[in-house]
Image (spheres, helix red, strand yellow):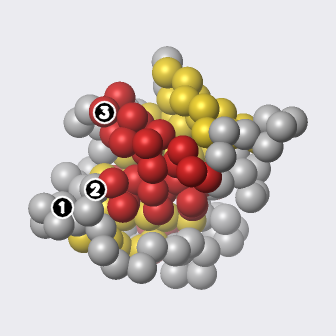
Amino acid sequence: MSVLKINSLKEINAVAKKFLSLVGNKRVFALYGAMGVGKTTFVKAICEAMGVEDTINSPTFSIVNEYHTSKEEIIYHFDFYRIEDVKEAYDFGYEDYFYGNAMCFIEWPEKIESILPSDAVEVLFQEEKNGSRTITIR
């Protein structure tokens, strides 16, 4: 288990790089945390650290966004907040995403826990009283 701390937005890019060094070759990340805690902002920082030049935003309505890095790697960013049933994930072929070689960042994994890969990395976001964010990786 590792714990990262973001005290201000000025630190987020450095923390994203630290996150990438800690997770090594892991590919699927289940991002847990309350709405507004910074999950999407953190994914954006990770994508930027990996050389994504596309516009990076929340896939709230599209469910999944695809980004390409400068090294021809693919990153998928999921937001399952709006799905009502895990069966909706079957409809778009989640297996191709979760079991491929691309990195997958999954917001609201609570909605699809039964189909998450067993080696998915849990990333817990928590807002502290002083406004900082704690990110626990397990």
Quarter-wise, where is residue 128 in the image? top right
Tell me whether circle 2 and circle 1 mark residues in contact (CB < 8 Å).
Answer: yes
Whether label 2 touches label 3, CB < 8 Å? no
Q: Position of residue 30 (x, y in %)?
A: 51, 45
Q: Residues within 10 Å of mark 2 (few under 14, many from 20)?
A: some
Most foreground residue, 45 or 25 = 45
**For mark 3, what is the residue?**
21
Instruction: Answer with left or right where residue 131 lies relative to residue 121.
Output: right
Type of the residue with mark 3: Ser
Q: In this view, does 54 lie above or below 13?
A: below
Q: Distance between the residues labelled 2 and 3?
A: 11 Å
- Residue at left offset 47%, top offset 40%: 15
Q: Which residue occupies 17% across, 66% down? A: 70
Residue at the far front in the pictured view: 10
Q: Residue furthest top?
A: 1
Indicate which label's residue lies in the foreground, 1 or 3. Answer: 3
Q: Horizontal and vertical percent for residue 111? A: 64, 54
Mark drawn on residue 73: 1
Asked if the residue at tag 3 contacts the one at tag 1, i.e. Cβ–Cβ closer than 8 Å, the answer is no
Q: Which of marks 2 and 3 is nearer the N terminus?
A: 3
Numbered disc 3: secondary structure: helix
Label 2 element class: loop
| Residue highlighted by disc 2 | 50
Residue 32's image quarter?
Answer: top right
Tell me residue 137's x, y (percent): 51, 29
